[in-house]
Image (cartoon, rainbow, N blue to C red):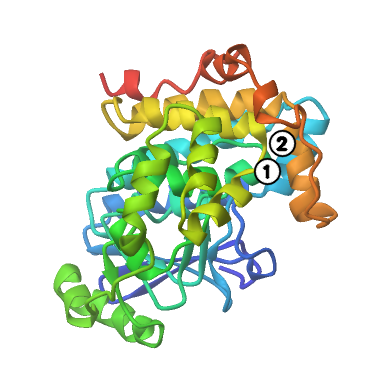
Amino acid sequence: MASEDPVLLGRTGHAALLTLNRPGALNALTHRMVGLIDAALTAWQQDDSVRAVVVSGAGERGLCAGGDIRAVREDALQGGRTSPAFWRDEYRLNARIARFPKPYVAFMDGIVMGGGVGISAHGGVRIVTERSRVAMPETGIGLVPDVGGTFLLSRSPGELGTHLALTGAAVGAADAVLCGLADHVVRSVDLSALTVALGEGNPRQAVRAFAAEPAEGELAAQREWIDACYAADDVEEIVARLLDHGHPAAKEAAATILTRSPTALKATLAVLRAARGLSGLEAALDAEYRASCAALALPDLPEGVRAQIVDKDRRPRWTPAELREVGDADVARFFAEPADGGLGLAAALG
């Protein structure tokens, strides 16, 4: 493959290598990339000489900053005709990764956000490093956490997942492991040697040989206020509890939440709470597809991307602007079946 291709494929011994190759865009996923990844997994699943798949990102900044939200914004401004097809294929790929029959080893080095979590945190072997910053920042651009993010975060200990979903906060290696987003910590300088080892012997034994015991992260020491404050049933009460709590980090979390899209915040809490009772990842992806399609028709998505990515003024003008202005009907639309009938992943599995 040419070096300018957005997905590079390779081999080292019995390990197949997949490298996201848009370093100038922090390896943001396009629809074409999703198709290339899926085709590669199809070929490698059928190839008996492939014993493991190793996924990494080109460049020095990270694995993947998420989906190509500039393209999603442009589509939203033009009526939202192409993004549902992208999400449909992306979410199906997320489900496939979770069920891939061979060790799927994801190097979650550097920045791993949104869609980057989707192509890594559902894998069988998830590796973070001292450089890792893992996040689901969707409420900051008017979206609900997707790519299976609500499934993962709803199963984090206590209310840690609620904290990460509403604030969009990025966590390091130790907290990623604590929250169930990763499995092992490996030094970034050892990833090249680990790649070779994965191709030479038993993949899981190779990972254990390089893995280190993670140090305690920041969230473990903050469980008391996180669990108490985020256990509330609505976003307004969560914010009130955070503001009333004495811990400085609680007040910082409240301040962050109040910068996010009020509509996305309320929809995120509802979808996240519902995910706790769902049967599995596929059902969560079905729900997230409904939520994403709903967000595509609302003004906060293009406005959030404008403020964060296009103009970078970090001053989004949300509609509505206040939590109290978001009603039950506004949240209910995130659960409505889209015009195309939905994703149908859970039903397909029977």
Residue closest to the eye, 218 or 143: 218
Evaluate whether residue 50 shows in this view.
no
User: At numbered mark 1, what does the secondary structure look like: helix, strand or loop?
Assistant: helix
Q: Percent position (x, y) of residue 210?
A: 23, 81
Find out whether the residues at labels 1 and 2 contact each other: C-beta distance under 8 Å: yes
Q: Percent position (x, y) of residue 253?
A: 54, 52
Residue closest to the eye, 73 or 89: 73
Give the residue at mark 2. Answer: 301
Q: How many marks?
A: 2
Would residue 27 appear left or right of 306 to someone viewing this image?
left
Would residue 131 appear left or right of 309 to someone viewing this image?
left
Would residue 45 appear left or right of 7 to someone viewing this image?
left
Give the residue at mark 1. Answer: 141
Q: Residue at x 60, y 31 (%)?
A: 85
Decide: is 91 above or below 120. Answer: above
User: At numbered mark 2, what does the secondary structure look like: helix, strand or loop?
Assistant: helix
Residue closest to the eye, 221 or 61: 221
Evaluate whether residue 71 shows in this view.
yes
In three-dimensional space, the C-alpha distance between marks 1 and 2, rounded to whole angstroms, equals: 6 Å
Residue closest to the eye, 311 or 286: 311
Decide: is 54 above or below 318. Answer: below
Q: Residue at x 39, y 49 (%)?
A: 226
Q: Residue at x 79, y 25 (%)?
A: 79
Would residue 304 appear left or right of 164 to someone viewing this image?
right
The C terminus: image quadrant? top left
Q: Residues within 10 Å of mark 2 (few under 14, many from 20)?
A: many
Q: Residues within 10 Å of mark 1 (few under 14, many from 20)?
A: many
Task: Residue type at mark 1: give it.
Answer: Ile
Please identify the quarter of the rendering in which residue 152 is found.
top left
Q: Earlier in the sequence, mark 1 or mark 2?
A: 1
Decide: is 260 above or below 222. Answer: above
Task: Residue type at mark 2: give it.
Answer: Leu
